[in-house]
Image (cartoon, rainbow, N blue to C red):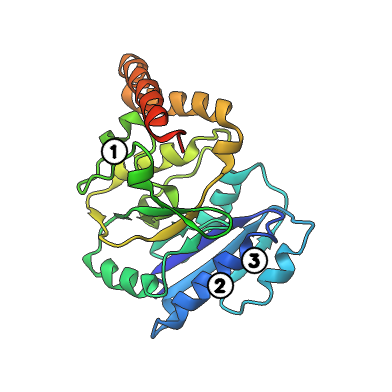
Amino acid sequence: MTLLTIVTITYNAERYLPRTLKSVEKALAKLGDKTVVEYLIIDGGSKDQTLNIASRFDFISKVVSEPDRGLYDAMNKGLNPARGKYLWFLNAGDEVQDDNILSQLISAFESNADVYYSDAMLVREDGSEVGLRSKFTPHNLPKNLTWKDFALGMKVCHQSFIVKKEIAPQYDYTNLSADIDWEISCLKNSKKTQYLDFVLCRYLMGGLSIQNHRRSLLDRYNVLKKHFGLIPTLWNHGIIFWRGFWFARKNGKYW
């Protein structure tokens, strides 16, 4: 039985993909039964060496390379054919935290929770650690997570959020904050959500929403309004901007 499907989205990712694949390869080496993990690469039609790099790793179950309508459309293309009981999106440049993570995850799955989540280690392109996301950003990580914890934004890093496929909705590929919407929807569908006391991933800073910051803020507002209503969202965004101002003033920058 395939317990876990890891999905990696790529597009001209020759610079970042090797670090992701090497980290997964090392973690798979610690597993007794590698067949419990499926690994999918969903590529947007890369013109560089991305596909050539992927071909060097024999643990990859399937590579799909074709034009898409953006990151979240590509994620849907990974979600839909996934055979694993659980889904984990680990994008090009991100890494499994250490060699023991997959073994720990498979053991954790024995509790049959609908959602598993943990902290994420933020790293720079050179691999140096910035710090845990819960410490480096204003988003402290609760031990008993619910969808209501997202009232002030992205509470859990998308790469440290693992969900049972049967409760996972499609991503809204038109929204740059579709990851927040998706996590909230998953948590609304979850009957059992479990905190993991180990760090799941090393998150490479500088994703799509950072590169398109203004639009992502508007899209986040629309997502939160959808789930929490107009007046609470307006109030909470006042808190978000005030919190961000003081966090940046104290730390020199936000994120």
For residue 149, side relative to residue 61 (left or right): left
Q: Residue 49 in the image: state x and y as whole percent.
A: 76, 64
Foreground: disc 3 or disc 2: 2
Residue 40's disc number: none
Distance in Å between CA atoms under marks 3 and 2: 16 Å
Tell me the element at label 2. Answer: helix
What residue does disc 3 label?
63
Q: Counting other residues with Cα less than 10 Å from the Cα at mark 3, is it few (<14), some (14-19), or many (20 or more)?
A: some
| Residues at marks 3 and 2 touching, judged by CB atoms closer than 8 Å | no
Q: Please, what is the three-letter code of the amino acid marked with disc 2? A: Lys
Q: Residue at x 41, y 82 (%)?
A: 30
Which of the 4 image quarters holds residue 135?
A: top left
Say if 19 sits above or below 187 in the image.
Answer: below
Q: Residue at x 42, y 59 (%)?
A: 201
What residue does disc 1 label?
147
Q: Could you tell which of marks 1 and 3 lies nearer the N-terminus?
A: 3
Observer able to see residue 173:
no
What residue does disc 2 label?
22
Using the image as rendered, state which of residue 240 and residue 124 is in the foreground.
124
Observer able to see residue 249:
yes
Q: Residue 112 in the image: state x and y as whole percent.
A: 25, 63
Q: Please, what is the three-letter code of the amino acid marked with disc 3? A: Val
Q: Could you tell which of marks 2 and 1 lies nearer the N-terminus?
A: 2
Q: Residue 23 in the image: state x and y as whole percent.
A: 51, 70
Foreground: disc 2 or disc 1: 2
Say if 96 sits above or below 114 in the image.
Answer: below
Q: Residue at x 45, y 58 (%)?
A: 202
Q: Counting other residues with Cα less than 10 Å from the Cα at mark 2, is it few (<14), some (14-19), or many (20 or more)?
A: some
Q: Please, what is the three-letter code of the amino acid marked with disc 1? A: Trp
For residue 20, side relative to residue 189 (left or right): right
Tell me the element at label 3. Answer: strand
Q: How many numbered marks are there?
A: 3
